[in-house]
């Protein structure tokens, strides 16, 4: 694998990568995620909310510049309150996207992405601000840059998008930032940030929330086709939603 190909494959490890997949290449990321939050501060009648999710993310290189893909999340949630403990299971998110890479060289890449999705419904009884009764449509811009090649590889990438929520929920601006260090061909260390900022244009009873997350993780690559990732996501600032923490373990495979 050339240096450029290796870096592009690494950058695509992040879900907000401006680097397109190579034509005919399929990437599958299968993750298990456990989330927990304390609800008692916002609702004295409730004490805890937990969820265990299976997240499958797919990307396919349709051409050298066009990548298509999507994700499906299926999970089970548990809500504990003064009335007892309740659980629910179902698809919490289904999403598809098409991404066009309009510039790329060994140092940098830039893309635009159109995403359509269906947000969570089955968890709405436990975390209503993360639920949704309509559909989502988002237009985003992505940029990435390889900062250093030697003695270690260092890269950064970012994405910003405007998400139109077709329903009662407020539209949001979403952003993601990724900073990565690759000391050798096997290990990658990532630090990512995520934010959702409401435009506060919800209808009566619609979702309106802000959230900022940080996510450190480590990746071990067995070879160019198989890798594992482990990490955690921490909600560091929220509005209208209880902060929580997620632990995750993922398996990547490229074909």
Image: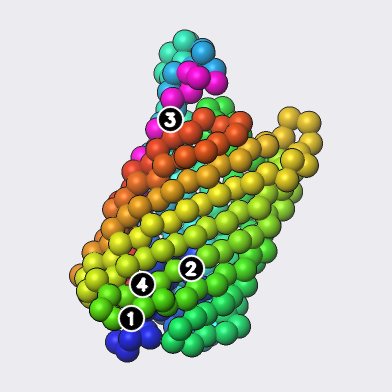
The percent position of residue 67, horizontal first and vertical second, equals: 53, 76
Which residue is at a point 45% across and 62% down the rendered structure image? Answer: 178
> Badge 2 is on which residue?
157
> Mark 1 or 3, which is nearer the eye?
1
Examine the image and state in which quarter residue 140 appears. Answer: bottom right
- Please report the bounds of the magenta region as a residue range: 32-42
Principal secondary structure, stretch drawn in magenta: strand
Seen from this angle, which residue lies furthest top?
82
- Mark closer to the chain start, 1 or 2: 1
Q: Is 190 on the left or on the right of 100, as rendered?
A: left
Which residue is at a point 51% across and 13% down the rendered structure image? Answer: 44
Q: Quadrant of the C terminus?
A: bottom left
> Badge 1 is on which residue?
149
Q: In what element is the residue under mark 1?
A: loop
The percent position of residue 4, horizontal first and vertical second, equals: 38, 86
Q: Which mark is residue 37?
A: 3
């Amino acid at each position: 694998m050339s240096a450029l190909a290796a870096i592009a494959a690494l950058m695509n490890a992040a879900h907000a990568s401006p680097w397109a997949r190579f034509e005919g290449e399929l990437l599958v990321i299968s993750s298990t995620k456990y989330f927990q939050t304390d609800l008692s501060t916002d609702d004295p009648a409730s004490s805890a909310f937990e969820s265990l999710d299976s997240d499958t993310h797919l990307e396919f290189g349709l051409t050298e510049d066009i990548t298509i893909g999507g994700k499906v999340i299926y999970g089970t949630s548990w809500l504990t309150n003064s009335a007892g403990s309740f659980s629910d299971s179902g698809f919490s998110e289904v999403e598809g996207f098409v991404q066009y890479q309009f510039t790329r060289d060994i140092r940098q890449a830039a893309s635009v992405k159109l995403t359509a999705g269906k947000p969570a419904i089955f968890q709405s009884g436990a975390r209503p601000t993360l639920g949704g009764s309509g559909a989502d449509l988002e237009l985003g811009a992505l940029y990435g840059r390889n900062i250093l090649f030697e003695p270690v590889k260092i890269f950064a990438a970012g994405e910003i998008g405007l998400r139109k929520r077709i329903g009662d929920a407020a539209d949001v601006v979403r952003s993601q930032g990724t900073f990565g260090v690759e000391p050798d061909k096997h290990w990658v260390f990532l630090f990512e940030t995520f934010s959702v900022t409401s435009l506060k244009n919800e209808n009566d009873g619609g979702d309106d929330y802000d959230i900022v997350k940080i996510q450190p993780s480590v990746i071990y690559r067995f070879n160019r086709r198989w890798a594992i990732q482990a990490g955690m996501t921490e909600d560091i600032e929220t509005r209208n939603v209880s902060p929580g923490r997620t632990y995750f373990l993922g398996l990547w495979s490229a074909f």
